[in-house]
Amino acid sequence: MAQATVTVLGNEPIATIRPEIYSHFAEHLGRCIYDGMWVGPESPIPNIDGWRTDIVEALRKIKPPVLRWPGGCYADDYHWRNGIGPAEDRPKTINLWWGKVIDDNAVGTHEFIRLCELIGAKPYLCGNMGSATPQEMREWLEYCNYPGDSTLAETRAENGSSEPFDVEYWGVGNENWGCGGNMTPDEYAAKYRQYSTFMHDMSDTKLFLIACGPNGNNPDWTRRFMDNLSSVWHHPRVNGFAAHYYCGTAGTATEYDEAQWYQLVKRATVIEDLIIQQRAVLDGYDPKREIGLIIDEWGTWHPVEEGAPDYGLYQQNTMRDAIVAALSLNTFNRHADKVVMTNIAQIVNVLQAMILTQGAKMLLTPTYHVYAMYTGHQGAKSLRALVDSPMAGCATKAEPGDIELVSASASIKGERLLVTLANLSATEAVDVKLSSVSLGEFNKATATMLGTGDIHAYNSFENPESVKPACTKATTDGDNWVVTMPAGSVCSVILER
């Protein structure tokens, strides 16, 4: 049995963990929206205004702070007027990026805003810079937010919403280094200056404008964007800067050996380098950190399952994905002073999804359960957590080097300390001792474990509860609490006085 110690330093607070770090992403891609969350008001599947009731209820439980929509690459060819007005009058359009399937635009702005209301999330609209004009983006903003009697505001009222939507988060383009126009950072900076000039606050809601960051950790993109942005006398407003990072795969979604387990887990740890280096570059231009670092697409990306269409990006979700989610969220918590929002990709049926559906059936993935176990971090104060553990893993040709056996983060809210842990070993259980400095004594511990040592475990529609959280024992030696974690498992420990 391996031994590890996690020491929480109460005298070294980092920052408040913004709830937005636990945000999500929904794109018109595969079965995420249609035949996923959306079934339509006339469906025999129970729904609320067209959105599946079981999915709405499940998402409420993990308290999603923000939901990003309609893409992704889909946003780069999305024209918002196609998604308003009577459903029967909306045009049928081609989904250019994902299979060239027909989108009947049944889900548009009003339907998306309704989903956000149902699950308690703030909407994050990703504007089309790739194939739309500054006027189109600016008019979408007016349609959503203007409280007066302009023609667009009156049209919104005619379509069912007399009150403005007050959308705060706006992406000014998406992946403009790729599907958003194949631009250089210099070209994108010029476009950003142009488009953002017309994105004005139109109500009491102050806009949070988000610029497209690099594909992965590319400091050159960030420097060139910021240099060009700063080259004019009137600096455009940039509130957020969004990078994308997918750790990819090793093997397949469900079939991988021990070396491939470590290969993917190690790739997932690289997101910490992105956070540190991208924030350092931004700090050179923005020492007061008025521009927030965002990672609004991240997660695993496995080969599409046999028989599924390539454009759908449907993948199964195992304990390996749960480990990736847990160590990533631990990383975000530890860097709460640097990260203001992250959006895992995606929410239903696509990539590292929270939920999978099959007809009327629905299941919660191991990744969903990680988010449920981590909800207590939202809005809490992140504390430095020192990990002393042996190394796990094996050197591989593709990804040389070992990784620390235990990933951890800690936060405190009132008299309640939450410590979240991931055992990254594919084979070895570990006793984790929890100690604290300058926090006093905690006389009650509640521990929850996800995983039993089977690193390939996942939930199927035949057995939808193979993987689910369970209460576990936390013992004390008088000064410290100890939990025993199986190989490849995730644990949350709530300590109270």
Image (cartoon, rainbow, N blue to C red):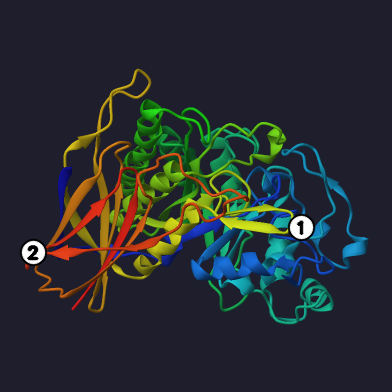
Q: Residue at x 68, y 65 (%)?
A: 141
| Type of the residue with mark 1 | Trp
Q: Position of residue 322 (x, y in %)?
A: 43, 48
Position of residue 159 in the picture relative to residue 444 (left or right): right
Q: Residue at x 80, y 38 (%)?
A: 100
Position of residue 42 in the picture relative to residue 256 (left or right): right
Q: Secondary structure at mark 2?
A: loop
Q: Position of residue 105 (x, y in %)?
A: 81, 56
Mark 2–mark 1 distance (CA, rounded to whole Å): 60 Å
Q: Residue at x 62, y 68 (%)?
A: 56
Kindly identify which residue carries mark 2: 477
Q: Which of the numbered marks, if any, corresponds to residue 80?
A: 1
Looking at the image, which is closer to me, 252 or 427? 427
Q: Measured along the vertical axis of the image, is residue 184 above or below residue 126?
A: above
Position of residue 233 in the picture relative to residue 203 (left or right): left
Q: Position of residue 97 (x, y in %)?
A: 72, 38
Q: Measured along the vertical axis of the image, is residue 151 above or below residue 103?
A: below
For the C terminus, the image quarter is bottom left
Q: Which of the numbered marks, if any, corresponds to residue 9?
A: none
Q: Secondary structure at mark 1?
A: helix
